[in-house]
Image: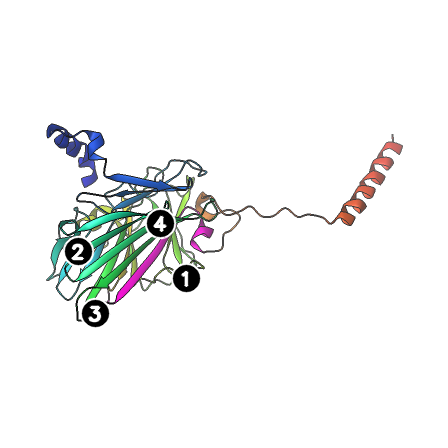
């Protein structure tokens, strides 16, 4: 059973302690450009966790893209101290032998606005500063995406080893069990969970229904034309959300046709070395439009999603229009003579 189903119980407990349901949700703040909306937790045990939905001006308005706040999160693997730091409270095991599970919410953390387009969450950890930016880019359906960038800084005076994991919990139009396919090069949609070691594809697509999808969502892996470019991961996985929500780093990929998520790993094959006082940033994008993540957009986006601009309608030069008009007049005259 998903932990998220315990939310009504949590609200009841808070109410019994004198808090209202509105107060329990008061830590959530949102931004939107009308096409996509980002909601983030700005206090409490899930500080920095965010979700994505379509906005009022999207062709499919007010639909979920990520599950509501509390189920998508990040992990910092401190391979020098053998610690797994998570910015949520769901994980119950480190997911790698010899490591301790640690929670970022036990350390100083703060959420600040990035203008009117997103939020920055700063976690001050022993030996590290972790800064997560979640920003909406664009102004139209054709160019709107959400960028997640995490910058890891070694705040010590010696090199340290680390890794990073993004864990995204998809919910397309209220459907948790999305179908996955790799794109560029393209694969077939599947509901079987799997690992893509050293992925060669540029991005992936997910839909709520293969035959009649409400819309598509697209997540980057690498390549494309966006700046900053997506950061190529060691691995991408299409996984059981409930399995990976329990483990901060790794667990077996099995099963399918169930509540799903995706995972990006950096520093999975071997930890990344970061010099004293140095920083490294990891970036990926999400959109409901293929072209908005820096990939060529077909006239009709695969999966039924809102694609880019429609194909241009051919136009004629003024002289061509005159010739066409004369020709049509002649045809009309002949038609009248036949009667």
Badge 1 or badge 3: first in the primary sequence: 1
The range drawn in magenta is 269-294
Residue 305 occupies which quadrant of the picture?
top left
Cα distance between the residues tagged 1 and 2: 28 Å
How many residues crowd around disc 3 within 10 Å: few (fewer than 14), some, or many (20 or more)? Answer: some
Residue 227 occupies which quadrant of the picture?
bottom left
Residue with the mark numbered 4: 135
How many residues crowd around disc 4 within 10 Å: few (fewer than 14), some, or many (20 or more)? Answer: many
Cα distance between the residues tagged 4 and 1: 19 Å
Residue mark closest to the camera, 4 vs 2: 4
Cα distance between the residues tagged 2 and 3: 19 Å
Seen in the picture, residue 78 relative to 211 is either above or below; the reply is: below
Q: Quadrant of the C terminus?
A: top right
**Disc number at residue 276?**
3
Seen in the picture, residue 227 relative to 32 is either above or below; the reply is: below
- The answer to which of 29 and 38 lies nearer the viewer is 29
Quick check: can you spot residue 196?
no
* Labels 4 and 3 touching (C-beta < 8 A): no
Residue with the mark numbered 2: 85
How many residues crowd around disc 1 within 10 Å: few (fewer than 14), some, or many (20 or more)? Answer: some
Residue placed at 17% from the left, 36% from the top? 6
Residue with the mark numbered 1: 223
Badge 4 or badge 1: first in the primary sequence: 4
* Element at label 2: strand
Magenta stretch encompasses residue 318: no
Residue mark closest to the camera, 1 vs 3: 3
* Labels 1 and 3 touching (C-beta < 8 A): no
- In this figure, what is the number of numbered marks? 4
Coloring scheme used: rainbow
């Amino acid at each position: 059973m998903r932990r998220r189903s315990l939310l009504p119980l949590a609200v009841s407990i808070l109410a019994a302690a004198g808090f209202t349901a509105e107060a329990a949700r008061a830590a959530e703040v949102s931004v939107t450009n009308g096409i996509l909306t980002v909601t983030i937790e700005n206090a409490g045990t899930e500080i920095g966790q965010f979700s994505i939905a379509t906005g009022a001006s999207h062709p499919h308005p007010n639909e979920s893209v990520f599950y509501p706040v509390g189920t998508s999160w990040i992990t910092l693997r401190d391979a020098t101290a053998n610690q797994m730091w998570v910015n949520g409270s769901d994980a119950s095991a480190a997911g790698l032998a010899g490591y301790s599970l640690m929670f970022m919410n036990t350390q100083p953390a703060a959420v600040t606005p990035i203008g009117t387009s997103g939020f920055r969450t700063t976690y001050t950890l022993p030996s590290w500063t972790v800064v997560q930016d979640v920003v909406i880019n664009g102004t139209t359906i054709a160019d709107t995406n959400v960028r997640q960038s995490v910058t890891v800084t070694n705040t010590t005076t010696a090199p340290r080893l680390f890794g990073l994991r993004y864990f995204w919990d998809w919910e397309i139009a209220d459907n948790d069990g999305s179908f996955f396919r790799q794109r560029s090069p393209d694969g077939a949609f599947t509901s079987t969970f799997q690992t893509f070691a050293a992925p060669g594809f540029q991005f992936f697509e997910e839909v709520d229904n293969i035959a009649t999808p409400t819309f598509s969502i697209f997540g980057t892996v690498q390549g494309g034309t966006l700046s900053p470019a997506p950061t190529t991961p060691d691995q991408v996985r299409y996984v059981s959300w409930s399995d990976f929500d329990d483990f901060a780093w790794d667990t077996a990929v099995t099963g399918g046709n169930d509540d799903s998520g995706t995972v990006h790993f950096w520093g999975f094959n071997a930890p990344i070395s970061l010099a004293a006082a140095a920083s490294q940033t990891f970036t990926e994008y999400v959109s409901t439009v293929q072209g908005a993540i820096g990939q060529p957009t077909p006239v009709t986006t695969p999966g039924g999603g809102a694609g880019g601009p429609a194909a241009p309608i051919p136009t004629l030069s003024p002289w061509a229009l005159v010739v066409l008009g004369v020709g049509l007049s002649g045809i009309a005259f002949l038609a009248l003579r036949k009667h």
